[in-house]
Image (spheres, grey):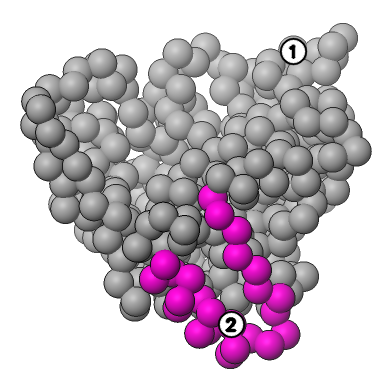
Amino acid sequence: MRLKIAVLAGDGIGPEIMEQGVAVTRAVARRFGHDVELREAACGAHAIDLTGDPFPEETFKICMESDAVLFGAVGDPKYDNNPAAKVRPEQGLLAMRKKLGLFANIRPVQTFDCLIHKSPLKDDIVRGADFICIRELTGGMYFGPQKEGDDEAYDTNLYTRIEVERILRVGYSYAQARNKHLTVVDKANILASSRLWRRVAMEMMKEYPDVTTDFMYVDNASMRIIQDPRYFDVIVTENTFGDILTDESSCITGSMGLLPSASIGEHTPVFEPVHGSWPQGKGLNIANPLAQILSAAMMFEHLGLKDEGAVIRSAVQASLDANVHTPEIRVEGAPHYGTKEVGRWITDYIERETT
């Protein structure tokens, strides 16, 4: 199979973890006989430095011409610490989502038995947790009308019925393929936008009688994720709530470096780790590449190549079982591995299994 993959490494640790994601992608392509063309493109602070635009038109063109996008991370302290900056790396991420029509962000949250001890939650609470957060990605406060002044500022949490319906359909499709339980998270007791979400969901739930639909206020959901994560199967929610809940959910596994994500919609899908650019770790060979590598697994699976994705997941699990860990999840007394060493171990494992 011939595949065109756009590679947007971005900023901070992005290029380091992307190097390992690309190496694993190439190893899988060799194993299964695929012809994969990988095209690099600039985004984020790197793109601002090159062109003044965090998501240049050339990058957009490469994304549109590709079957999928492997994305790293964007963000740089020189923009974070400058409130007056007119252009920011994160604007490139928002522009990519909008231009590619990526309205649904899919974030699996799953524990690994060999790393339960790294979770801040107790074993009997977290073991076996396995759910998906589906976040609406192109509406709400991140894209609504806003004003910023010295004495007054506002953001508008704007949603239309069409936007709510389409993300709910994604949620129901995932719930039907899993354990048939969908939790719609909102703040309908306070927010008009949330009341629209709830009205639309209550209308649509009649179309999916095989799925148990329940509703939960966002403050209750944030507490329930910590107290009883195994309650959830599929969560669907709006942009701002989803941003917060998915980061909270990441702590369940013990490291954000273990969680991949997919953003899907109208055009080319994007696959990326849930963590940020972590500029403090740049160049130190300590960043965990597993989320980037597992994002490649999600990419293959989305393209209908289930066996290819399974091979990557098997290799990652084997690396965890063998205590091939970067520092933040390293088991006491185990050997030290860096970003490159973990990536090389997984790549070698995939190639060894071929012979």
Residue 213 among magenta residues: yes
In the image, 302 versus 217, the foreground residue is 217
Q: Is residue 168 above or below residue 16?
A: below
Label 1, residues with CA under 10 Å away: few <14, some 14-19, many ≥20: some
Residue 34 visible, this angle: no
Amino acid type at circle 2 is Met
Q: Is residue 146 left or right of residue 269?
A: left
Amino acid type at circle 1 is His
In the image, 206 versus 192, the foreground residue is 192
Q: Is residue 72 left or right of residue 88?
A: right
Name the quadrant containing residue 136.
Answer: bottom left
Label 2, residues with CA under 10 Å away: few <14, some 14-19, many ≥20: some
Q: Which residues are magenta?
A: 195-218
What residue would you read off at disc 1? 336
Q: Is residue 229 left or right of residue 152?
A: right
Q: Are marks 2 and 1 in contact (CB under 8 Å)?
A: no
